[in-house]
Image (spheres, rainbow, N blue to C red):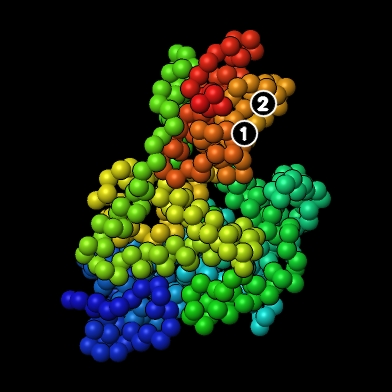
Amino acid sequence: MCYSMEVNETTSVGHDFGRGEAGVAARREAEELVALAGRDRAEAEHRFACLSTEEKTAVVCAAPAEDRIDLILLAESPEEIVPKLPARELYEAVQHMGKWESQEVVEHVSETQLNFMLDHDCWKGEKLDTRKFTDWLRLLMECDDGQVFRLLTAINVDLLAYYLKRQVRFNHDVMINDDYYCDPGWITARNTVVREFLERLYAMDPNLWVRLLGWVRMHSRGTMEADAVAGRDARLLGRGIPPPTLAISIYYPVPVDISGELERWRRETLDAEDASECLTPALPRREALLLGRAIRREVRFDEFYRVRMESQLLDIANKVIIADNLDIGDLTRRREALDKVRRWTNLGLEFLARDDEELAAGLLREQPLEYFFRLGSMLFDALGTGAVELEKKERRSGGRLARSRWLTTYFSLIQPEPRIPGENGLGSARAIASLLEYRYAWQLVGFLEKALAMPEDESVQNRSVLDHDSL
């Protein structure tokens, strides 16, 4: 018994699951399962479990909207079925059952499915229904703890930012050298759901919180409304990614735990017996990036592979230009954005594949390049946070590092994007492009933390390979 048909989240419009022999069989199976569940739910669950994932999906889609949620919940693992359902069929089912009654299903929706439901349910013409959106936000925050962060960060940022623009008030904030600074205590909101959302987002990812609130603060309500409407219209017309409106989602994290690895690297440095052990190697040598090597490996089998990869890199770079508020007409800035995309994407890929070209090529077949860029962004956010903590300790010390032979190393690390010192002073500080260089940067942070913990006379006298000014 097989009802296999093409069912995925991109086919959200125009599918007729009752057409053909497979459709008739799937509809009959759905009717029988619904009837059986009314008499003997355990038997219905067993019968449903005997179907393949594709068959379960086809049966759910072939059923009337009022029966789809019940059928999904017959599955032992609804998360295997829900993301495969076309967005329209799923939305019709949730609308019929009610979103709160469908919470067990909603918590497993994909990004595309979630935004399809928000785009259709939360707008009246070109006006956002804030009450409905608030209700959705409350629902998502009450889902399973393991799903909340994924769901909240899946909301299209143009919509979320416009909603927050209407809900929050900034009592204070700071711009220093074009960098935006904000603190949770400086933001107020009358709506308790909004306050809870901001508190939870800050607790889960403070860097993302600052980026989102910074965007909300620095753009006018009219601009954000136009962006949200244009984004919604583009998605409803099936054009996929909206035109350049709001691209901050390029910095959204991916579900990869980096904390354990980073803590291990940091402890290796802090636990070293003396400072000279921290940085036995000098500056890491620059080698061909793993990303490039893995792409060249695949080009041998597919001559158009490189073109597709370059296209993805350019798409990411365009998002970065918008998210970083760069002048899209400035050729130098565009080149810098593309260089950043290559480096950060390579770093994310290396973190997962280390130096294994075959594994890296396999990962590139499984995930789009944006996945690895976003992982690289997580790594740079962590390093940036480490550099900020180092800067705080340096200020409390009265500026000891700035007066020492390590000032070049220190100032390289505390740049808006942390760098590692070059061989010819601060002007030659180089951007981090590989995992080896990234680990080296963490060694530098750990070394300087140890230097600040020493008595001042001892730390000043201690010579080290960090003395790049003398090279």
| Numbered tag placed on residue 279 in the rendering | none
Residue 213, position as x, y percentages in the image:
68, 54
Position of residue 316 measured from the top left corner of the image (x, y, whole percent): 49, 62
Residue 255 appears in view: no
Depicted 441 relative to depicted 44: above or below: above
Q: State the residue at coordinates (64%, 56%).
A: 212
Mark 2 touches mark 1? (CB < 8 Å): yes
The amino acid marked with disc number 1 is Phe
Residue highlighted by disc 1: 411
Residues 47 and 56: in front is 56
Q: Quadrant of residue 63?
A: bottom left
Three-letter residue code for mark 2: Ala
Q: List x then y, in percent, for residue 441.
A: 49, 34
Image quarter where the N terminus lies is bottom left
- Residue for point 37% across, 64% down: 309
**Percent position (x, y) of residue 92?**
48, 78
Q: Which residue is mark 2?
A: 402
Q: Provide the secondary structure element on which disc 1 rests.
A: helix
The quarter holding residue 153 reads bottom right
- SS for callout 2: loop
Front residue (pair 99, 345)? 345
Counting residues from the N terminus, which is met first, the one under dot 2 or under dot 1?
2
Seen in the picture, residue 422 relative to 75 is either above or below; the reply is: above
**Which residue of the protein is positioned furthest toward the bottom in this rendering?**
20
Q: Is residue 105 left or right of residue 398?
A: left
Q: Vertically, is 229 above or below 184? A: below
Apparent side of residue 375 relative to residue 35 in the rendered image (left or right): right
Residue at the left extreme, as displayed:
1
Q: For label 2, count other residues whose C-alpha is less than 10 Å away and answer few (under 14), some (14-19) or many (20+).
A: some
Query: Can I make out residue 187 in this image?
Result: yes
Near-viewer residue (349 or 41): 349
